[in-house]
Image: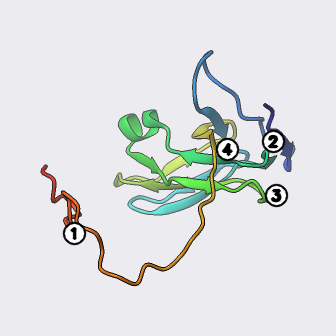
Amino acid sequence: MMILFKKLLPSASLPKYAKEGDSGMDVSAAEATVIPARGYGKVRTGIAAIIPANYELQLRPRSGLQCNKGIVGAFGTIDNGYRGEIGVVLYNHTDAPFSVEVGDRVAQLVPMEVRQFQIAEHTGDMPASERGTGGFGSTGR
């Protein structure tokens, strides 16, 4: 299978797998930007994708940014019909501004198969289950 990427900016880099067998391909910044302390910022990648039918690209954070720098990336979905620039939202958990330079790896893209379901309204009572209505930490720590 193949995903085609288009560079929208001269500074853009195509995503690439760091190691053989990796599920996520690294995505890099195409423009320098600063993520404010305790704030959000959008990072331009300068790329767009042609994703095969029945697939999506899941945008995922990079664990190294989170663990080593205190920078958390937002999860996202790039639907196969989207043709615009892929952007990455980062949140800075630190008390100092965080500089992103051109070429910095800021997220991962993971291709995933998509299945659409039929949707219908259920008008009766909800069926019983072991979990019931418990949510938000109801199963333990």
Quick check: marks 1 and 2 in contact, CB under 8 Å? no
Give neighbour class at mark 2: few <14, some 14-19, many 20+ (Cα, 10 Å).
some
Instruction: Label 1, secondary structure: give it.
Output: loop
Q: What residue type is labelled 3?
A: Arg
Q: In this view, does 20 lie to the left or right of 85?
A: left
Q: Nearer the viewer, mark 3 or mark 1?
A: 1
Q: In this view, does 74 lie to the left or right of 106?
A: left
In the rendered image, which residue does mark 3 sit on? 83
**Labels 3 and 1: the sequence-earlier one:** 3
Q: What residue type is labelled 4?
A: Ala
Instruction: Label 3, secondary structure: give it.
Output: loop
Q: Can residue 88 be seen in this view?
A: no
Structural distance between the alpha carbons of marks 2 and 3: 19 Å
Quarter of the picture holding the N terminus = top right
In the rendered image, which residue does mark 1 sit on? 133
Name the spot of residue 61 as percent of width and height, x first: 50, 44
Within the image, what quadrant is residue 68 found in?
Answer: top left
Q: How many labels does the image show?
A: 4
At 58% from the left edge and 29% from the top edge, which residue is drawn?
23
In the rendered image, which residue does mark 4 sit on? 29
77 vs 62, nearest the viewer: 77
